[in-house]
Amino acid sequence: RLTHSLANAVYRKTSGNIFFVLEFLKSICNEGFLYFSLKSNQWEWNIPLIESKNTATNAVDLMLHKMKQFPKDVQSALKLFSCLGNDCEECILSLITSGDGIDEFGCTDMMSSLEFSIEEGLLDYSDSIYKFVHDQIQIAAYSLIPETDKEKYHLWIGNQVWANESALSEKAIFVTVGQLNKGE
């Protein structure tokens, strides 16, 4: 009963979608609309501010807004990673980052940027595989790349993996071919 007004406001803004709910709660906490009061020793919120908050109409817009707040290096790493699809083995990423030219894409430390993304809840890492936690996050990251540049990204990734042909596994060959096809 005590949280009824907050629950209703969050539901109205998110339609109950759990992904939206979690991201919305994070955003209203970050903006100070929902906070823990040390004075009253309880959670407090401002319903008029929560109700007036503009919300994304879908998960992609919500994630785009969040990603645009990240450092440019992290945004650049997410763009590159999104070109690979929903997940990628660490060994493939090491082939991509081992050559020259990654700085042309604004990414100076891909692995640190991916670690940052894990801490922010966008990626998971398990068994040497990085993975977007939700397909909508991958779509949002990919949409950060201007349409006119997408082929350039794919072509560069394909060439980077191919340049390390001595280390190519069967999976790396498929990644290379897929990226080069998208980069034509």
Image (spheres, helix red, strand yellow):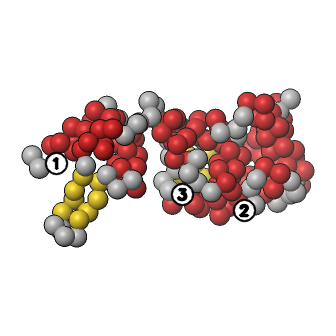
The residue to which callout 2 is attached is 109
Q: Counting residues from the N terminus, which is met first, the one under dot 3 or under dot 1?
A: 1
Along the line of sight, the residue nearer the viewer: 92 or 82: 82
Vertical order, 92 against 41 (above or below): above
What kind of element bears circle 2?
loop
Along the line of sight, the residue nearer the viewer: 120 or 184: 120
The residue to which callout 1 is attached is 3
Q: Counting residues from the N terminus, which is met first, the one under dot 1 or under dot 2?
A: 1
Q: Quadrant of residue 13?
A: top left
- Badge 2 crowding class, 10 Å Cα cut-off, few under 14, some 14 to 19, many 20 or more, is some
Question: x%, y% of residue 130?
Answer: 60, 53
Left or right of 129: which side holds 177? right
Residue at 17% across, 42% down = 5
Vertical order, 167 against 134 (above or below): below
Question: x%, y% of residue 8?
Answer: 21, 37
Q: Which mark is residue 136?
A: none
Left or right of 46: which side holds 98? right
- Tell me which amino acid carries mark 1: Thr
